[in-house]
Image (tube, grey):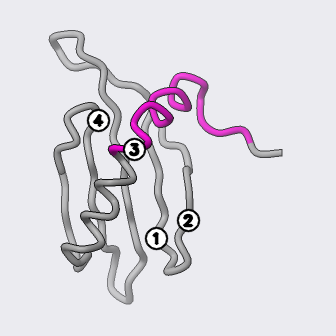
């Protein structure tokens, strides 16, 4: 399951997964940044808590990816918190 976190002015959507477990029991989540393009999407997926990029397609610039990494690093505790709660609750 994925949950919406934010939408940037350029239509980049930020979503995060529910909490998943690796075979060794370690918990992780994926945070995805995806922007619609004429023929598909620009996509970058970070895995937390390692902050590694596990998928990258399209044309996000290095600067955009660094901004996304900063968002993921600063908000990691929130992504895990909201994943445990089943997403953000909007009124």
Task: Indicate the position of residue 19 as horizontal and vertical percent values.
Answer: 40, 26
Check disc 2 and report the residue beneath it: 7
- Mark 2: few, some, or many residues within 10 Å (few <14, many ≥20)? some
Check disc 1 and report the residue beneath it: 12
- Mark 3: few, some, or many residues within 10 Å (few <14, many ≥20)? few
Q: As displayed, is residue 59 above or below residue 54?
A: below
Query: Range of the magenta residues?
Result: 73-89
- Mark 4: few, some, or many residues within 10 Å (few <14, many ≥20)? many
Going from the N terminus, do you reach mark 4 or mark 2 first? 2
Q: Could you tell whether 91 is left or right of 89 in the image?
A: right
Q: Give me the residue at 34% from left, 60% from top.
A: 68
Going from the N terminus, do you reach mark 2 or mark 1 first? 2
Q: Could you tell whether 35 is left or right of 10 in the image?
A: left
Distance CA(mark 1)–CA(mark 4): 20 Å
Check disc 3 and report the residue beneath it: 74
| Circle 2/circle 1 CB separation < 8 Å | yes
Distance CA(mark 2)–CA(mark 1): 6 Å
Tell how many labels. Answer: 4
Q: Main secondary structure of the magenta part?
A: helix
Task: Indicate the position of residue 29 as horizontal and vertical percent values.
Answer: 35, 33
Q: Which mark is residue 48?
A: 4
């Amino acid at each position: 399951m994925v949950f919406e976190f934010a939408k940037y002015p350029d239509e980049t959507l930020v979503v995060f997964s529910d909490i998943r477990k690796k075979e060794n029991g370690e918990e992780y989540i994926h945070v995805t940044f995806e922007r619609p393009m004429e023929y598909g999407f620009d996509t970058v997926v970070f895995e937390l808590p390692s902050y590694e990029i596990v998928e990258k397609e399209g044309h996000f610039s290095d600067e955009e990816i660094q901004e996304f990494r900063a968002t993921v690093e600063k908000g990691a505790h929130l992504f895990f918190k909201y994943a445990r709660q089943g997403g953000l609750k909007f009124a």
